[in-house]
C-alpha cells in the first residue's frame, strides 16, 4: 500500500519531490519489475522518460513493466512514442504522443530536452523560429541578447553556430558609448555591429533543415572508441567528441556525440594557454561522457598544440600556477589515456573555436564526420613526431622561483594532510594505518584486532603526524637539536629555546620548567601556523569550544600547543567559520563560565624577598568635590617560593614605607635578606618613587630597621633594572588584569585594601604538588600550608560574574572585580610567560683582565668609558651576570649586559664584539 501525497508544482521543492517519488518507487518495486526499476532510476529527467532497447521484444517488455509498475503506484504513463510501430501495437491512441490521422505527416516530431525527435525517421532536428527580429526594425542590445537567449543546444551539435553568438554577446557587453560607459539597453547598435548581427541572424533558420541520426553506433559493434578533439583561437576555445564503432567485418562508423565551447576571457591570454583550457574542457567532457554511456570505450585525446603536449608530459610543479593547476586536473582526469598531436587543418575542434555560419555548418564534412583518417585503420592515423617543438613558448610558463632544499612535488605529509578536512578523521585514519602496519610487521605477536581505537593509538598517531609536520617545517632547527646544538640566532624559534623530548617532538623549553603545571602546559608542542595540519587542529578546537573567540581559543590551545603566528591563524579560522555568525554569545559565555579554575605555583614562607612599588592608583574620594587621592602598592616577593605579599600605602614617604615593611614583617615573620632596585634604575617612574629610593635618610632608616631585625638589605647594581625580573613579573601578574577589570572604577581605601588582600590570597593559593602519594587525595600543597599550616581559603561568596555591575552594591562590586581578575589571570597569564623577548642567545664567557667598554645610555657611543674586568660574579647556574670593573676613576660594579668586549686578538681577550648578554 502506498500513502498518497500531493506534489504542488510551482514550489521550489516540486522538482525534487517528483524525482524522489520515482526513485522510491524504483527501490520498492525492484524485485517485481527489475527492468522498469533500473530504467526509472537512470532514464528519467524530471517528467520525461527517454530509454530504449536493442530489440523490439526487449522494448515491449520494458514498456509493459513500466506501465505495470507505475499503475501499482496510481501513476499513469502517457504520450508513448517509438521509432518502431511494433513496440506500440497495444498502446491506446489516447496514450500515444503522435496521433495517426488521414493527413499523416512524416514530419511529426516530439520535443524533448530542447531537441525535436522524428520517431518515424529516428532523427533529431532543430526548430529555429525568428519572429523577434526584422531587418527593418532597430537592433538594440536588448533585442539581440533576447534572441541569443532563445538558442538552446544541450548536446552541442551546432556549437559552431552558438559560439558565434557567444562571441557577439561578449562584444556587446564590452561595447562602450561616448562617455566611456556601457551602451544603453535600448540604444541602436553601431553600423558594424548591426551588419554583423544581421548577417548572423538571417542564417539561423537554416538550422531547421538539419537532420541528425540519433543512433551513433554501428549495428552489432564489437569495439567502441571515443575521440576528443580540442582547439582554441583568440576569441574562444572548445572541444568535440566523436564515437568510432567497428563491427565484426571491419566496417567503421563515425558519429558526432557532443561538444562544448567557451569564449576566451577579456583579459588577454596567450594562445598556448587557451589551448590548454581547451584540453581541460576535453578532460571534463570525458568524465561526463564516460559516466553517461553504458558501453566500454577507449578514449583518445587530440590537440594541435605541441606546447600543450609538452606541458602535459611534465609534473604540474614544473610550471607556473595557471598552467600547473590545469595540467594537474587534466592528468588526474585522463589517467591511462593517450594524448596525441594532430594537424590544425584536420582538427574539427577548430570549427568550434572560430565559429561557423549556419549555411556552412550544414555542408561541413569535417564537423559531422570528424577527421578523414578516423574512418580508416589505425595504421593510417597521424604519426606522432614532435620534433618541431617551440621551446620558447614552453619555457615561458616554467616556474622561475627555484625551490631550495624542497622537492618539486608536495611532500608526503603535505599531500596526506591535504586529503582531510576534519582533524579527528585524520587521526583515526592514521591510527588504523599504524595498526595495520604493526599487525603485518609483528604478525602473530601483539596483534591488535579490536574494532575501536584506543586513546594510546590516537595519541601515537597524533605525535607521528606532528613529528612529520615539524620535520618538514623546521628542518634546520630539527637537525641542530638532534646534534645537541642550539638553534640559529636567525631562527624564528630562537625565542622559545626549543628542545627535543623523549617522544622526538620539538617542544618549547620556555621559562616554565619548574612550574607545577602539566608537562604539556610547560613544554608546548611547536607548530607552524601556515600548515594545513595546524588549520585542521585549530578548526577542531574552535568547534569543540562552541566556536569561541580568539582569546579563549588561544588560551586553550596553549595548554598543549604553541602555534607560530597563532593569532592570525586563529582569526582566519574564525572568519572562515560560517557557524560563528550564527552562534549565540550566551553559549560561549556559558562555556567560559564552566571552565575549571586552575590555580598555579607557590611555595615556602618568606625568607629572602624582593620589594618593588606599583602605582599610583587613584582611590574614591570621600566627598564628590574632592580630587581622587593617590595610593601605591608595595609588593613583597619571596625568592624561594615566589609567594606574594601586598601592602597599600597612601604615599611614598619613608615613614609610610617603613610602616608597610613593619606590617609585612609582623604578618609574615622575619626574613634574612631584602633585595630592591637602586634608585637609578627607576627610569620613567614617579618622581616621588625615585626621590625616596635615592634619599640617604631612607637608606639609613631602612638599614637601621633591618639591622634591628637582623635583616640584610641589598640593592641591585646601578642600571641593572632587569635584575628585578622576579618582582616585576609579580607586579605584572596582578596589575595587568587588575587594571583591565577595574578600568576607571575607583574604590575607597578599605575596599581597595580588601581587594588587594584577596588578590594576594589568589596568588598564594596556587598549587605546588600533592600532599600524599595516595591517588585518592586530591588536596594540593600551596604556600598557605607553609604560612598558616593549611590552604588559604577565601570566605565563600556568591558568584557575581553573570550579574551586571550596576545592579550590585559597593561590597558586591568589589567581589565581582576580584572574581573577574582571578578568572582572567589564571587563564591568560601563565602561558604568556613562555616566549623569551630577550636573553635567548648563549651567554658570552667573560674572563678577568678582559678589556671592555661600559655601555652608558646617557652618552654617545664614542664617549663610552673603557674598563678592564677585575672580577666576575657567576650565579648558581654558572652564568655571569655581574662584573667588577677597574676604570680610570676607580672600581665599579655593573651588570654583564652593560659591557661590550673589545674585538682585540690577544691571549687575554676573546675575539668577539658581541654584547655580553646573559640569560
Image (tube, helix red, strand yellow):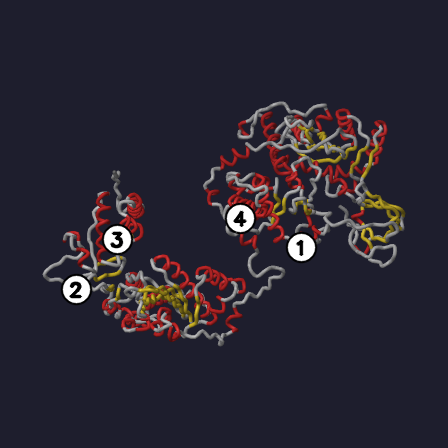
What SS does tag 1 mark?
A: helix
> Which is closer to the viewer, label 1 or label 2?
2
Percent coordinates x, y for residue 687 in the rendering = 74, 39
Q: CA distance from mark 3 to mark 1?
A: 65 Å
Q: Earlier in the sequence, mark 2 or mark 4?
A: 2
Residue to which mark 4 is pinned: 572
Badge 2: few (under 14), some or many (20 or more) residues near its Cα, within 10 Å?
few
What SS does tag 4 mark?
A: helix
In depth, the one of 689 and 899 nearer the eye is 899
Q: Which residue, as the protein is rendered here, is positioned at the far left?
A: 102
Residue to which mark 1 is pinned: 476
Task: Please identify the quadrant where the N terminus is shown.
Answer: top left
Residue to which mark 2 is pinned: 106
Do residues under tags 3 and 4 come within 8 Å of each other at their CB atoms? Answer: no
Percent coordinates x, y for residue 708 in the rendering = 85, 27
What SS does tag 2 mark?
A: loop
Percent coordinates x, y for residue 510 in the rendering = 69, 43
Q: Residue at x 14, y 52 (%)?
A: 92
Q: CA distance from mark 2 to mark 3?
A: 23 Å
In the figure, 381 relative to 723: above or below? below
In depth, the one of 199 and 281 nearer the eye is 281
Badge 1: few (under 14), some or many (20 or more) residues near its Cα, within 10 Å?
some
Left or right: residue 20 versus residue 598 is left
Q: Residue at x 80, y 56 (%)?
A: 912
Q: Residue at x 71, y 30 (%)?
A: 646
Amino acid at each position: 500500500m502506498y500513502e498518497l501525497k500531493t506534489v504542488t508544482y510551482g514550489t521550489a521543492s516540486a522538482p525534487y519531490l517528483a524525482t524522489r517519488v520515482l526513485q522510491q518507487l524504483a527501490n520498492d518495486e525492484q524485485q517485481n519489475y527489475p527492468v522498469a526499476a533500473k530504467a526509472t532510476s537512470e532514464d528519467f529527467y524530471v517528467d520525461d522518460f527517454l530509454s530504449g532497447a536493442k530489440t523490439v521484444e526487449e522494448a515491449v517488455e520494458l514498456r509493459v513493466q513500466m506501465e505495470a509498475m507505475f499503475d501499482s503506484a496510481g501513476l499513469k504513463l502517457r504520450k508513448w512514442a517509438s521509432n518502431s510501430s511494433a513496440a506500440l501495437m497495444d498502446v491506446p491512441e489516447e496514450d500515444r504522443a503522435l496521433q495517426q490521422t488521414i493527413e499523416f505527416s512524416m514530419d511529426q516530431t516530439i520535443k524533448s530536452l530542447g531537441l525535436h525527435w522524428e520517431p518515424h525517421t529516428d532523427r533529431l532536428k532543430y526548430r529555429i523560429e525568428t519572429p523577434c527580429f526584422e531587418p527593418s526594425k532597430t537592433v538594440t542590445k536588448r533585442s539581440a541578447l533576447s534572441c541569443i537567449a532563445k538558442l538552446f543546444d544541450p548536446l552541442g551539435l551546432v556549437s559552431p553556430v552558438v559560439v558565434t553568438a557567444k562571441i557577439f554577446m561578449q562584444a556587446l557587453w564590452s561595447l562602450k558609448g561616448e562617455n566611456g560607459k556601457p551602451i544603453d539597453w535600448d540604444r541602436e547598435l553601431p553600423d558594424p555591429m548591426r551588419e554583423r548581427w544581421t548577417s548572423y541572424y538571417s542564417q539561423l533558420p537554416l538550422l531547421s533543415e538539419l537532420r541528425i541520426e540519433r543512433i551513433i553506433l554501428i549495428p552489432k559493434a564489437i569495439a567502441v572508441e571515443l575521440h576528443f578533439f580540442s582547439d582554441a583561437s583568440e576569441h574562444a576555445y572548445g572541444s568535440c567528441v566523436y564515437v568510432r564503432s567497428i563491427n565484426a567485418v571491419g566496417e567503421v562508423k563515425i558519429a558526432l556525440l557532443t561538444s562544448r565551447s567557451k569564449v576566451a576571457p577579456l583579459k588577454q591570454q596567450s594562445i598556448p594557454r587557451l589551448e590548454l583550457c581547451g584540453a581541460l574542457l576535453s578532460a571534463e567532457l570525458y568524465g561526463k561522457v564516460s559516466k553517461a554511456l553504458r558501453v566500454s570505450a577507449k578514449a583518445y585525446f587530440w590537440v594541435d598544440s605541441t606546447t600543450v603536449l609538452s606541458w602535459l608530459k611534465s609534473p604540474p610543479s614544473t610550471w607556473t600556477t595557471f598552467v600547473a593547476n590545469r595540467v594537474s586536473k587534466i592528468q588526474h582526469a585522463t589517467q591511462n589515456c593517450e594524448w596525441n598531436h594532430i594537424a590544425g587543418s584536420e582538427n574539427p575542434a577548430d570549427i568550434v573555436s572560430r565559429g561557423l555560419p549556419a549555411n556552412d555548418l550544414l555542408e561541413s564534412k569535417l564537423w559531422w564526420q570528424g577527421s578523414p583518417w578516423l574512418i580508416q585503420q589505425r595504421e593510417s592515423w597521424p604519426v606522432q613526431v614532435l620534433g618541431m617543438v617551440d621551446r620558447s613558448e614552453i619555457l615561458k610558463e616554467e616556474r622561475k622561483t627555484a625551490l631550495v632544499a624542497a622537492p618539486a612535488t608536495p611532500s608526503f605529509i603535505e599531500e596526506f594532510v591535504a586529503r582531510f578536512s576534519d582533524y579527528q578523521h585524520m587521526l583515526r585514519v592514521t591510527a588504523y594505518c599504524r595498526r595495520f602496519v604493526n599487525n603485518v610487521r609483528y604478525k602473530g605477536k601483539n596483534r591488535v584486532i579490536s574494532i575501536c581505537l584506543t586513546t594510546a593509538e590516537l595519541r601515537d598517531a597524533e605525535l607521528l603526524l606532528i613529528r612529520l609536520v615539524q620535520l618538514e617545517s623546521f628542518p634546520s632547527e630539527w637537525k641542530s637539536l638532534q646534534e645537541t646544538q642550539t638553534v640559529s640566532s636567525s631562527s624564528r624559534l630562537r625565542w622559545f629555546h626549543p628542545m627535543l623530548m623523549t617522544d622526538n617532538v620539538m617542544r618549547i623549553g620556555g621559562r616554565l620548567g619548574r612550574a607545577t603545571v602539566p608537562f604539556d602546559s610547560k613544554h608546548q608542542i611547536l607548530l607552524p601556523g601556515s600548515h594545513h595540519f595546524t588549520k585542521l587542529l585549530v578548526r577542531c578546537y574552535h568547534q569543540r569550544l562552541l566556536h569561541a573567540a580568539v582569546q579563549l581559543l588561544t588560551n586553550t590551545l596553549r595548554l598543549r600547543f604553541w602555534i607560530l603566528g597563532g593569532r592570525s591563524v586563529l582569526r582566519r579560522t574564525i572568519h572562515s567559520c560560517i557557524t560563528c555568525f550564527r552562534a549565540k554569545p550566551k553559549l560561549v559565555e556559558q562555556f567560559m563560565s564552566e571552565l575549571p579554575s586552575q590555580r598555579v605555583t607557590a611555595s615556602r614562607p618568606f625568607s629572602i624577598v624582593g620589594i618593588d612599588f606599583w602605582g599610583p592608583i587613584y582611590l574614591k574620594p570621600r566627598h564628590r568635590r574632592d580630587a581622587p587621592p593617590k595610593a601605591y602598592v608595595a609588593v613583597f616577593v619571596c625568592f624561594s617560593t615566589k609567594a606574594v605579599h601586598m601592602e597599600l600605602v597612601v604615599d611614598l614617604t619613608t615613614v609610610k614605607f617603613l610602616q608597610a615593611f613593619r606590617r609585612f614583617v609582623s604578618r609574615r615573620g622575619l626574613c634574612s635578606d631584602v633585595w630592591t632596585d637602586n634608585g637609578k634604575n627607576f627610569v620613567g617612574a614617579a618622581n616621588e618613587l625615585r626621590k625616596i629610593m635615592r634619599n640617604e635618610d631612607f637608606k639609613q632608616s631602612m638599614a637601621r630597621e633591618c639591622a634591628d631585625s637582623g635583616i640584610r638589605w641589598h640593592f641591585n647594581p646601578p642600571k641593572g633594572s632587569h635584575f628585578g625580573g622576579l618582582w616585576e613579573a609579580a607586579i605584572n601578574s596582578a596589575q595587568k588584569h587588575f587594571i583591565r577589570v577595574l578600568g576607571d572604577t575607583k574604590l575607597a581605601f578599605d575596599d581597595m585594601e580588601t581587594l588587594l588582600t584577596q588578590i594576594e590570597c589568589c596568588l598564594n593559593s596556587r598549587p605546588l604538588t600533592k600532599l600524599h602519594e595516595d591517588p585518592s587525595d586530591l588536596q594540593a600543597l600551596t604556600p598557605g600550608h607553609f604560612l598558616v599550616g593549611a590552604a588559604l581559603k577565601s570566605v565563600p561568596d556568591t558568584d557575581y560574574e553573570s550579574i551586571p555591575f550596576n545592579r550590585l552594591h559597593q561590597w558586591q562590586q568589589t567581589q565581582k572585580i576580584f572574581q573577574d581578575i582571578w578568572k582572567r589571570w589564571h587563564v591568560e597569564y601563565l602561558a604568556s610567560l613562555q616566549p623569551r623577548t630577550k636573553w635567548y642567545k648563549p651567554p658570552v664567557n667573560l674572563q678577568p683582565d678582559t678589556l671592555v667598554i661600559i655601555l652608558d645610555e646617557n652618552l654617545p657611543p664614542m664617549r663610552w668609558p673603557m674598563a678592564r674586568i677585575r672580577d666576575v660574579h657567576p650565579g648558581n647556574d654558572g652564568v655571569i651576570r655581574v662584573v667588577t670593573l677597574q676604570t680610570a676613576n676607580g672600581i665599579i660594579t655593573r651588570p654583564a649586559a652593560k659591557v661590550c668586549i673589545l674585538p682585540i686578538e690577544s691571549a687575554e681577550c676573546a675575539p668577539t664584539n658581541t654584547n655580553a648578554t646573559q640569560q
